[in-house]
Amino acid sequence: MSIDMVEVARRVLSENGFVTAEPPVDGIPARDPLDGVQDLRHLPWSSIDNHDSRDLDQIEWGERLAGGAIRMLVGIADVDALVPAGSPIDAYAARNTSTLYTGVHIFPMLPRELSEDRTSLLEDRQRLATITEMVVRTDGTIDDSATRIYPARVRNHAKLVYERVGRWLEVGGLLDDDHHTDAIADQVAMHDEAARRLRRRRVEQGALDFETIEARAVAKDGKVVGLEVARKNRARELVEDLMIAANGATARYLEAMQRSSIRRVVTKPKRWDRIVELARSHGYELPTEPTSRALADFLATRRQQAPDTYPELSLSVVKLLGPGSYVLQRGGEPDVGHFGLAVDDYAHSTAPNRRYPDLITQRLLKAASRGEPAPYSDEQLVEIAAHCTERENAARKVERTMRKVVAAAFLSTRIGETFDAVITGVTPKGVFARLFYPPAEGRIVSHEEGLDVGDRVRVRLVDTEPTRGFIDFVALR
């Protein structure tokens, strides 16, 4: 059976309340407002992303300071400069709240003329960026007194790729066939050093280090021709650590200026009792009350003892932690914090081409740095935060459904085969399991009694319905 995967994606998005028409292009300014800002185009900025990414949100540059500290400048695409609040483009972005990745087609939050061109920090293009300048001390703490936010003209000197940079950081050789210059290589090495300091500090504070495996569709002409798995490497960790630091620095910047903001929070897990059970099954005792430090120690121990099955454990804990949400944070009020990252201050700010909360934060930062009134009232921020949380949950549902659609199409010729799996969900709608390979998730329709998240189980594939993303298993007891 031939399936038009893009049409399936459109249907799934529509069923979940998303607009699938292309974003409007009305009101895009004829020229970029580059005048009157600091010119930093001469600095050897670089980015690291997927090889086919065009919506580049961030670039980095660093320098060493006396005493061993590293000053890191993270340049974030100034989307606000070309997407005024209240414009038709802004209204579209506010409705969907994110770029939607379905595995077979990307539905952008902004017109491609912006997100993949004029607001994208593409290589060798002059662009306007909002700079987050922060100083990383040798112990991995950030000197908040040195944090600055300001606009600048920038030029990305090297668009690097995760896999190549990761290989260079881990085993050496050439950084990149096209970009192996001493200046860029020295910069990436410095960025990695700063990132490792930051990660070490977060681990000391109890940050959770997960390694989950997600399959990505390999599509050609709207048809799935295979599944591939993106794995963690040093380059992905480098970018992740610097972005977590920048998100924290911007949150504290707004707090120090007594400005309200939208924070990204993950509260203490409601199913901590099940996490305790999982740890006990591995011979490890966790406290009865949730603590990220204790959970981080358990995960680190299991990673060292059983690296082959660690992704399975990671997935189970991620499911039990539950999703994050966006909330209003008034300046000076106690922080809710992010349980998984072990940080108190966290505001999404580093991906305004792809996430609407980041665009809101960018507007708040620009107003604060200029001493201007806040562009949003607290009541508006509460409404925006609630809508973004609801839409993110819907987007997560779309991504899960589309992964199932892709996997169901891929597995449709393997009815009757048996697989090893892990239980990923127990809900009123049923018990769900994910295969170890291919990493496809489906529902257990028989012999599911007594199973819970984290349990390993052998299953037989009994049916698939690719257009709906249905994959049915029978648990083998």
Image (cartoon, rainbow, N blue to C red):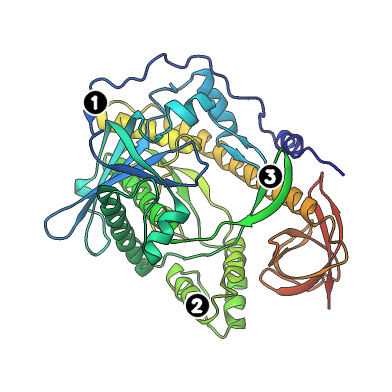
Give the residue at x 68% y 50%.
400
Between 438 and 270, the one lying in front of the other is 438
Which is closer to the viewer, label 3 or label 1? Answer: 3
The picture places residue 86, in percent across and down from the top left corner, at 48, 20
The correct choice, above or below, for 13 with respect to 321 in the image is above
Residue position marked by numbered label 3 in the rendering: 219
The correct choice, above or below, for 219 with respect to 212 in the image is above
Q: Which element is circle 2 on?
A: loop
Q: Can residue 337 be spotted in the picture?
A: no
Query: Which corner quadrant holds the C terminus?
Result: bottom right
Q: Earlier in the sequence, mark 3 or mark 1?
A: 1
**Residue 279 in which image quadrant:** bottom right
Instruction: Judge from the rendering whether residue 243 lies leftward or rightward of residue 191; answer left or right.
Output: right
**Residue 454 in which image quadrant:** bottom right
User: Are there few (<14), some (14-19), or many (20+) residues within 10 Å of tag 2?
Assistant: few
Q: Which element is circle 1 on?
A: loop
Between 260 and 404, the one lying in front of the other is 404
Q: Can residue 311 be spotted in the picture?
A: yes
Q: CA distance from mark 3 to mark 1?
A: 43 Å
Give the residue at x 79% y 56%.
429
Q: CA distance from mark 3 to mark 2?
A: 46 Å
Q: Which mark is residue 287?
A: 2
The picture places residue 168, in percent across and down from the top left corner, at 38, 60
The picture places residue 13, in percent across and down from the top left corner, at 70, 36
Q: Which mark is residue 37?
A: 1
User: How many numbered marks are there?
Assistant: 3
